[in-house]
Amino acid sequence: MFPYLVVTAITVGIEDDELPEDDELIVVQLRQPEGGAEIGPDSQVTILVMANDNVAGLLGFQDTSYLVQEGTICVTNPHN
């Protein structure tokens, strides 16, 4: 297809969505060369797509401190 091609670029589109996901791997492997070409020892690369969201949820406090009196139950609704 491309005679004497030594270097080329491929584009891998990564679409960000609202679904919580773990890290994902993409494996790119060279196979079936044509025209007498040979594939060298580095025929595969692994791309790590790091998650940009929290799969298990994000836990924390709304404020860094609370003032309560003994015997008082302090409940904060994070959905306010």
Image: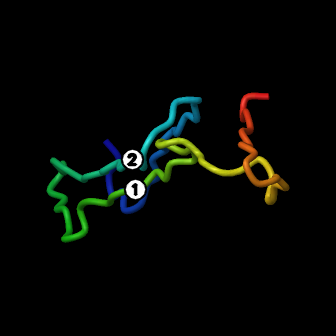
**Circle 2 residue:** 24
Residue 47 is tagged as 1
Q: Is residue 77 shown above or below 27?
A: above
Q: Position of residue 52 (x, y in %)?
A: 57, 47
Residue 23 is tagged as none
Along the line of sight, the residue nearer the viewer: 51 or 46: 51
Which element carries disc 1, helix, strand or loop?
Answer: strand
Closer mark to the observer between disc 2 and disc 1: 2
Name the residue type under label 2.
Answer: Glu
**50 lies left or right of 2:** right
**53 lies left or right of 32:** right
* Disc 2 from disc 1: Cα separation: 8 Å
Report which quarter residue 38 is drawn in: bottom left
- Tell which residue pokes out farthest to the bottom in this image: 41
- Which residue appears at 20% of the width and 68% of the height? 40
Q: Earlier in the sequence, mark 2 or mark 1?
A: 2
Q: Quadrant of the C terminus?
A: top right
